Amino acid sequence: MSYAGQMLDAYPRDFNLDARMLTTTMDALIEYAQACTADADADMSERNVVELVKCIRLCMDCADVCAATVRVASRQTEYDANVTRPLLEACAATCKSCGDECELHAQMHEHCRMCAEACRRCERACRDLLAAMS
């Protein structure tokens, strides 16, 4: 079980979201923020870095959005869906854009393929949690 899941299991109060789904989303956000950071760094090491500028930018933006979203989603005391929902929506949209861009480079760069895969997983997790919140 992930650290996020362990922390939710140890949480002293009940909360409004399904713990398993929240854990899955938090894990995806954490993993994806790391994948985006690593992909942006790998992109900057490529010989054709100029062709990867948009990919680098989207990866950096996505890493920041995912990191902020997981921090807010982790706070369950006096939870307010009106704060979490727009962050999850922004995260899903950013993951989609980043995944689309990474897929353009996936045949040439394995790190972009892996990042695109992580993008899709994170986007799905955010959309699933959003659907559960409705």
Image: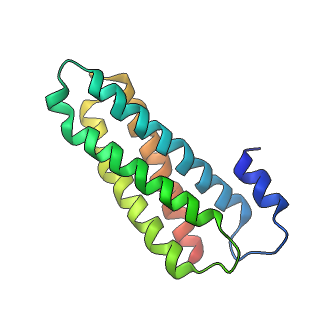
The residue under the point 52% across, 70% down is 130
Query: In which quarter of the view is residue 89 placed?
Result: bottom left
Residue 128 relative to residue 51: left or right = right
Could you say where residue 81 lies in the image, as x and y percent from the top left? 56, 79
Query: In which quarter of the view is residue 132 placed?
Result: bottom right
Could you say where residue 20 lies in the image, as x and y percent from the top left? 72, 58
Residue nearest the observer in this picture, 111 or 40: 40
Whether 10 is drawn above or below 46: the answer is below
The residue under the point 49% across, 39% down is 34
> Residue 75, can we see it?
yes
Whether 47 is drawn above or below 20: the answer is above
Residue nearest the observer in this picture, 80 or 98: 80
Could you say where residue 52 lies in the image, as x and y percent from the top left? 21, 33
Residue 24 relative to residue 105: left or right = right
The residue under the point 19% across, 37% down is 53
Considering the image in quadrants, where does the C terminus appear? Answer: bottom right
Residue 124 relative to residue 95: left or right = right
Residue nearest the observer in this picture, 116 or 6: 6
Residue nearest the observer in this picture, 110 or 9: 9
Q: Residue furthest top?
A: 47
The residue under the point 19% across, 26% down is 49
> Residue 99, can we see it?
no
Q: How many marks?
A: 0
Whether 108 is drawn above or below 95: the answer is above
Could you say where residue 1 lies in the image, as x and y percent from the top left? 77, 44
